[in-house]
């Protein structure tokens, strides 16, 4: 993602059939800030969304991982929060 500040989210993604482990790996650079990552699921029938797991780590170029082991909802997305402007690199992985 380009340099951003504040709260921003990824597009939604659909969980494939049989997938139970979902994780988001993310990092940023700068050493003067913290990156907060939320792995969020979307509730059915338009009932909103809820944080399944969250993590927070320093923007020092090291990867942080937020992982859930019993994914059951159909739609997920990641949300990021930064208090200073930084580039965020992330990807989503899943395992059957």
Image (tube, helix red, strand yellow):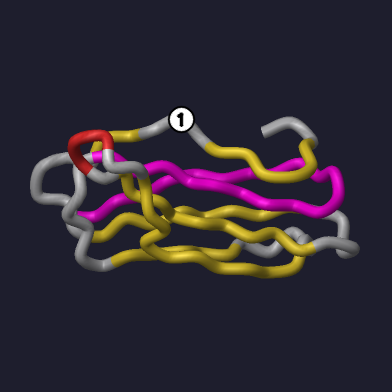
- Percent coordinates x, y for residue 55 in the rendering: 55, 68
Q: Nearer the viewer, residue 83 or 15?
A: 83
On the rendered structure, is 75 left or right of 9? left
Q: Quadrant of the C terminus?
A: bottom left
Q: Main secondary structure of the magenta part?
A: strand
The verdict on residue 90 being magenta is yes
Q: Residue at x 75, y 68 (%)?
A: 58
Q: Nearer the viewer, residue 36 or 23?
A: 36
- The span picked out in magenta is 75-96
On the rendered structure, is 93 left or right of 17? right
Q: Residue at x 50, y 65 (%)?
A: 54
Mark 1 — residue? 11
- SS at mark 1? loop
Which image quadrant for residue 29? bottom right
- Percent coordinates x, y for residue 78 in the rendering: 48, 46
The verdict on residue 48 being magenta is no
Q: Is residue 33 above or below residue 45?
A: below
- Percent coordinates x, y for residue 46 in the rendering: 26, 34
């Amino acid at each position: 993602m380009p340099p951003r500040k504040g709260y921003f989210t990824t597009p939604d993604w659909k969980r494939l059939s049989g997938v139970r482990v979902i994780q988001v790996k993310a990092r940023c650079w700068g050493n003067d800030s913290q990156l907060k990552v939320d792995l969020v699921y979307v509730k059915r029938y338009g009932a909103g969304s809820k944080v399944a797991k969250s993590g927070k780590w320093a923007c020092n170029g090291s990867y942080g991982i937020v992982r859930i082991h019993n994914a059951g909802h159909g739609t997920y997305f990641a949300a990021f929060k930064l208090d200073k402007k930084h580039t965020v690199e992330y990807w989503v992985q899943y395992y059957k």
